Amino acid sequence: MIPFFKYFTISSFIALFAIIFQAYFESGQLQEVTEVLSSLMKLENVNRKSIPKVIIGYGSCSDLTVRAVDFLNYSENFKESFSQRDQNDDEINTFDDFMKSFLYYFSKGAAAERYTPNKEMFLNLVNIAKKHESHRWELGGNAAVMGTRFLIEKTEVLLAATMSDKQKTHLINGIDLVDFKPTKDFVDDIHLILEYKTGERFGEHVAPRANRYIIHSDANNPLIISLELLKPNALKGDLFVVSGLQMMDNYPFSSPTLRSERLEAVKNQIISLDKKTLTHFEMASFVEIELLNDLTKYILPYSDSIGLNEQEIDNLLHVLESGKISLVANSNPRVATTLDQMRKVFKILNRNYFANRDTDKNVRMLSRIHIHTLAFQLILNVKDSKWKNIKTAAAKSSLIAHRHVCQTSYVNPDNAILVLDDSFSTSIEENAKTDDVRPKRIDVKKSGSAISCWIEKLKVDEKNLVEVKICVAPVLVCREAKKTVGAGDNISASGLAMQI
Ligand SMILES: *[C@@H]1O[C@H](CO)[C@@H](O)[C@H](O)[C@H]1NC(C)=O
Ligand SMILES: *[C@H]1O[C@H](CO)[C@@H](O)[C@H](O)[C@H]1NC(C)=O
């Protein structure tokens, strides 16, 4: 028999070893985080000779945010309806539909934004949320949030959004707003945002990462009523941003062709711009395949740049390759996977560009892609395109990701984790075999800079080889997520602001 004290010694030795190891590991992490931080901060600023002008469409809303797991009441009844959920269950007509949808995205940690035609159920939820202790109100909507970020990054901003006079008072000073006189019965659209943190529990479901689920019942945004308020003579600038189109998803338009007509109006607005004005389309979480098909027809061919997250690139690629949507993807993908998806999207969209440019003089080459994920920022620029300062944009957007989610302007290394590995492959082997890109291993530590950039030649079609520059910036992931809504908009806008 082993005497008692031996047990004691062995177990305490193990415990001590574990503590030392943990401390050693954490100090290593801390040092790495500090190095990445200083490397990013050295790169995050630009010196501009003149102030660029940005025009941003479309819309705004009032964001009402609550803590999902405190606000919603779990019921055992959800179990059954959750297990019966299928891919097409994205119409939200009842409270039960809503819970089913929420649980699905929550358990995957995927951001979602869904429309419900059931105004009564929606207003009921809003009324409960308004009284909930965790609630907060803010000005929201992709265009308004991006506009705010652009202004902070020292650009001139014209925003196309319709707001009540009360809502306008929440808009940051300095943004130029289109002229809109609200009628007496005009009400701002409300978005109810259910936020959750990594590891939060709801019944038997655990959120794999911090994110948010948005439910809305918009009346103004789906119709893009601010579009016509952008008068032709106001459409002069360095960059035109299209965002907020996901509000048209699942919306019951009064006529079957109305949505396409509105998207065609967006297209006409874009093609009325001077070719010198760069165009950016901020994607979002789309569910309806018809809408995505319309986007590939009316919006994508006229966009110089697109911004999207890991779910959205997966979805877009699915649509382009197979005509089907993908609702959720891995919420923390590998760099190689995302790079492969980015190249494929780049090639498909530009193959269309090369095929159509002789017949449609308005099509634009897709010359910029920005993918924002939890662990890294990925930016692609076509060489010799008009986009400037790619490295600065990668650094800036990475820092903004941390600052936004942690809600701080000062980045505390103790409150950050690096999720991206020290080295990564630029392509997944099996894809590389069939592709023109030879996978490389990028060793982030060896390169001396937190941001890794390299050049590739992408074979778009038989005749066209396009040279691109790609940069990857690690994100200092916020340990204690305070806010996820608006992250993508802040990140995208900060990157764009550095590149014009
Ligand atoms: C959750 O339950 C409480 C207590 O019964 C109730 O007051 C509240 O309205 C419920 N919340 C929701 C979102 O249904
Ligand atoms: C992003 O935008 C929102 C709304 O404009 C703002 O509340 C938030 O603090 C911004 N994030 C950062 C990092 O400034």
Image (cartoon, grey):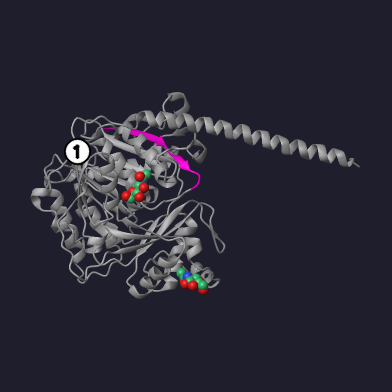
Give the answer, above or below, for where 190 lies relative to 404.
below
> Is residue 26 inside the magenta stretch?
no
Which x, y percent locates residue 447? 43, 24
- Which secondary structure is most common in the magenta stretch? strand
Image quadrant in which you'd find residue 496: top left
- The magenta stretch is 467-480
Q: Is residue 75 left or right of residue 256?
A: right
Instruction: Depth check: give the residue in front, 92 or 60.
Output: 60
Which quadrant, please, contains the C terminus? top left
Q: Is residue 128 left or right of residue 161?
A: right
Give the answer, above or below, for where 277 lies relative to 230.
above
> Is residue 479 inside the magenta stretch?
yes
| Residue drawn at the location 28% of the way across and 64% of the way down | 189
Which x, y percent locates residue 207? 51, 55
Amino acid at dot 1: Pro
Which x, y percent locates residue 260? 19, 62
Q: Is residue 2 left or right of residue 58?
A: right
Mark 1 Cα-neighbour bin, 10 Å: few <14, some 14–19, many ≥20: some
- Check disc 1 and report its element: helix, strand or loop: loop
| Residue drawn at the location 80% of the way across and 37% of the way down | 10
Work out which residue is located at the far left of the displayed protein and give it.
233
Is residue 451 shown to the viewer in this render? no
Is residue 139 shown to the viewer in this render? yes
| Residue drawn at the location 44% of the way across and 53% of the way down | 211
Q: Is residue 71 left or right of residue 461?
A: right
Image quadrant in which you'd find residue 117: bottom left
So how many labels did they put on this image?
1
Give the residue at mark 1: 52
Which quadrant, please, contains the N terminus? top right
